[in-house]
Image (spheres, grey):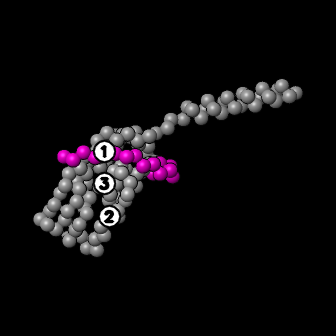
Amino acid sequence: MKKYYLFGCIVLMALFFSCKNSIPSFEPEILTAAYSLKSFEGTERGFQVHVVVDKLPESAKINSIVLKNKRFEKLNYDTIQKYKIEINQFLPIQSIQIQNFNPPMTDERADGIEFDIEGRLLFIETNFKLK
């Protein structure tokens, strides 16, 4: 009887581990990360950012971008393909035109992008290229 129990446990463990490895794990891949400095008539200063991310699950979202020790949280992005998105946005550092403007918070981390994937925070360091 012990042999059948042991054999059953081994079969169940093998089945469990084989199914666990077949679940694809999505790690976002950053294809393009570039920025340029923008200034609009002395009233606004900031970064124009262009980022393309591939292999991003549908349930995932981008929490923030950390660029030059500034954390930008309000991001707009367009879906290019099923798992591919593009961010092309002006991220202000200083603004006179925006009422009650709050400058971005400082962040000591290296430049990168923070993702929220199924409740798990993932920070990927990124080398943003200056255009």
Q: Disc 2 marks which residue?
A: 104
Instruction: Establish if 46 lies above or below 24.
Output: below
Q: Secondary structure at mark 1?
A: loop
- What residue is drawn where x is 28% and y is 46%? 128
- What residue is drawn where x is 65% and y is 33%? 16
Q: Does label 3 or label 1 sit earlier along the sequence? A: 3
- What residue is drawn where x is 38% and y is 54%? 109
Mark drawn on residue 95: none
- Residue stretch rendered in magenta on the structure: 116-131
- Which quadrant of the figure contains the N terminus? top right
Q: At which x and y percent is residue 12?
A: 71, 31
Q: Is residue 24 magenta?
A: no
The picture quadrant where one finds residue 42 is: bottom left
Q: Amino acid at mark 2?
A: Pro
Q: Amino acid at mark 3?
A: Leu
Q: Secondary structure at mark 3?
A: strand
Q: Is residue 117 magenta?
A: yes
Q: Main secondary structure of the magenta part?
A: strand
Closer-to-camera residue (122/23): 122
Q: Disc 1 marks which residue?
A: 127
In the current view of this chain or complex, which residue is farthest to the right?
A: 1
Alpha-carbon span between mark 3 and mark 2:
10 Å
Instruction: Establish if 41 lies above or below 11.
Output: below
Q: In the shown orientation, is residue 47 left or right of residue 29?
A: left
Q: Disc 3 marks which residue?
A: 67
The picture quadrant where one finds residue 41 is: bottom left
